[in-house]
Image (cartoon, grey):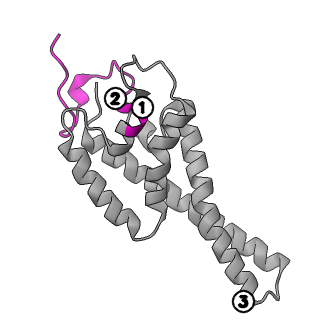
Amino acid sequence: MLAGPLRRIVARLVDFVVLTVFAAALCVLAAVVFDSVYPDASDGAAFLLSVLLLVGVPVVTVRVHVRVVQRWGRSLGKWLCGLKVVPLWTDGTVPLTRRAAAVREAAACLATVVPVANVLVGAVLLVQLLSNRPYWQSKFDRAAGTVVVRWPASADASLAGPGDPSPAAP
């Protein structure tokens, strides 16, 4: 059964919060280590640390997120919402390729870690997702050849939320 937009949005919000906490922890850890190693550092060294963090945090979060989705087909948010990313036209047991996971997740992750862009990109993608019926595919899903489904596939149809599509008749 295809995942409805409500579950997908909640899963993406959970992932956003997790990525934000992860990025903040990396920044704090880097600042503490930098301050302990170079207590009398100049402004140039602090600027260099800032640039490294602005580039390094998005790269690390994208690599982690892509790897997790490629390996298990789901991120923490998707797991909590009972969703899985699968290749189109499969029964859900075929694993994602690294390319499909990277195409699907990299742009979305980068859009969520860049300040201000995350709100603008999120609003555009939300409108686009809601207008793509009945498959509820985002641009990233279409580019990667994937679809988000309820998982396990035998999930009880009575648990479907208001944004979930109704199950097909036998």
Horizontally, residue 57 falls left or right of residue 133, namely: right
Q: Real-space Cα distance between discs 2 and 3?
A: 51 Å
Q: Quadrant of the C terminus?
A: top left
Q: Amino acid at mark 1?
A: Lys
Q: Nearer the viewer, residue 95 or 150?
A: 95
Q: Quadrant of the N terminus?
A: top left
Pointers 1 and 2 in contact (C-beta within 8 Å): yes
Task: State which tag comes first along the sequence, 2 or 3.
Answer: 3
Q: Amino acid at mark 3?
A: Asp
Any magenta on residue 1? no
Above or below for 48 versus 169? below
**Mark 3: secondary structure:** helix
Name which quarter of the figure residue 51 lies in: bottom right
Circle 2 sits on which residue? 150
Q: Nearer the viewer, residue 150 or 110?
A: 110
Q: Nearer the viewer, mark 1 or mark 3?
A: 3
- The secondary structure making up most of the magenta span is loop
Horizontally, residue 26 falls left or right of residue 149, namely: right
Q: Real-space Cα distance between discs 1 and 2?
A: 6 Å
Taking the spot 24% from the left edge, 49% from the top edge, the residue there is 128
Circle 3 sits on which residue? 43
Taking the spot 55% from the left edge, 46% from the top edge, the residue there is 65
Above or below for 67 versus 24? above
Q: Amino acid at mark 2?
A: Arg
Label annotation for residue 84: 1
Q: Give the image location of residue 9, x and y in percent.
A: 32, 48
Name which quarter of the figure residue 25 lies in: bottom right
Q: Give the image location of residue 109, x and y in percent.
A: 48, 53
Range covered by the magenta-colored residues: 143-170
